[in-house]
Image (cartoon, coloured by chain):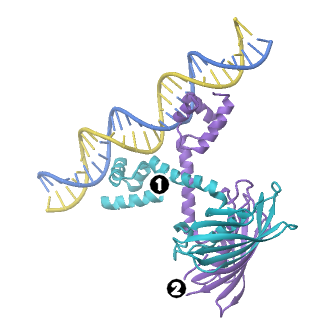
Chain colours: A purple, B cyan, C yellow, D blue
Amino acid sequence: MKRSKQERQQKLIETIKANPFITDEDLASHFTVSVQTIRLDRLELSIPELRERIKHVASKSFEDEVRSLPLNEVIGEMVDIELDQRAISIFDVKSEHVFMRNSIARGHHLFAQANSLAVAVINDELALTVTSTLSFVKPVKLGDRVIAKAIVVSKDEEKNRTFVEVTSSVENEVVFSGQFEMFRTNAQSKGEMI
Amino acid sequence: MKRSKQERQQKLIETIKANPFITDEDLASHFTVSVQTIRLDRLELSIPELRERIKHVASKSFEDEVRSLPLNEVIGEMVDIELDQRAISIFDVKSEHVFMRNSIARGHHLFAQANSLAVAVINDELALTVTSTLSFVKPVKLGDRVIAKAIVVSKDEEKNRTFVEVTSSVENEVVFSGQFEMFRTNAQSKGEMI
DNA sequence: ACTGATATTAGTACCAAGTACTAATATCGG
DNA sequence: CCGATATTAGTACTTGGTACTAATATCAGT
């Protein structure tokens, strides 16, 4: 039934990963070894104790929660903005943004960054994306820092339209570009989009 | 400096809410009362102890994580698919998808649903969005159920391109449409997007 | 079969952050 | 000043550990 130490430790890693809430005692009975053995295993594998594991999971999600609340309106971090002119935001590609199997960022995050930047650069109460044309130039990978630059290219004051061009790059290489036609108004709340 | 018990308890609730990771000891010195007082307060307010609070935060996020892992690939719920032909998915607009101030769905969620559906309908190892043109027809509100239909309209076998048209509607009214030019290949792993 | 190394188990003291409970003081309102 | 409420102190006990020592098991190789 049981096999080598290495095998057990491998399973241990998986088991704890699948359920970080498991105690040493439960692990011991699960692998039918003593609690001390489990503790030695954790020591060797430098797996922290239950409380530390839980704390880690909790603090990770707590930070995310805190971060996603006030900054909700812009995807990525705004570093520069001149209303009605240009805006720049950076977005770090983390594991939650990529496909599992190839670590490539999912397109909607790039779109989200670009689009929310286009919304932000508009100096009005209300900004609404009407149409957009996107070009995904180059795959973006886990760990990449994407810098999006939005530039207001033209306006049609009569129709309340603003045209914004967004170019995103990673290490000075263009990875994405999009043209956004935005509807703008300072009316109270006819409805807003994006 | 200090005020009534009620006032302290009110602050206590806020403090713990803002930072669930705080110990009774830290709370005690923060409010310059004894640890026992803090414990009586928690008892009266039925605020659980630190470890239980942390566990709660962690398990909440852990469930979310588990849920988002396998369903990671498609945004929304796939209800029908005929590879290389058409696909349908539904997406319920929840509070995390909308702007706080007007309860209107943020565009990238509509894009994400449409785009992941376009990826899914492609019957190949690899599907990559090259370009897309989007039209946000009508604002989508909190609580709306968005039904996206993807239809493969044409193919360019030589260039490995597939053109997909996605139309999203709420209660039979079109709210969004997009044309997606997809790159496809069954090569192992040249890179993938979206 | 014996030896040495590695692995496992047992046991103790100690820690953090509590609960549960009892008992002694403070403080305040009338 | 008295009684009620609030606060503080203190003890025993709990969980899920760490850190450490020491005793066994198990296995591999000669």
What residue is disc 1 on? Answer: B20
User: Can residue A47 be seen?
Assistant: no
* Left or right of residue A122, residue B194 in this image: right
Q: Are marks 2 and 1 on the same chain?
A: no
User: x, y (%) of residue B80?
Assistant: 64, 63
Image height of C21 relative to B150, above or below? above
Q: Count the marks: how many? A: 2
User: x, y (%) of residue B14?
Assistant: 42, 61
Chain under label 2? A
Q: Residue at x 36, y 49 (%)?
A: B39
Image height of B50 relative to B136, above or below? above
Around disc 2, counting alpha carbons within 10 Å, would you say few (fewer than 14), some (14 to 19), or many (20 or more)? few
What residue is disc 2 on? Answer: A188
Q: Residue at x 77, y 57 (%)?
A: B125
Label 2, label 1: how many angstroms apart (C-alpha)?
38 Å
- Quadrant for the C terminus of chain B, please: bottom right
Q: Residue at x 75, y 55 (%)?
A: A102
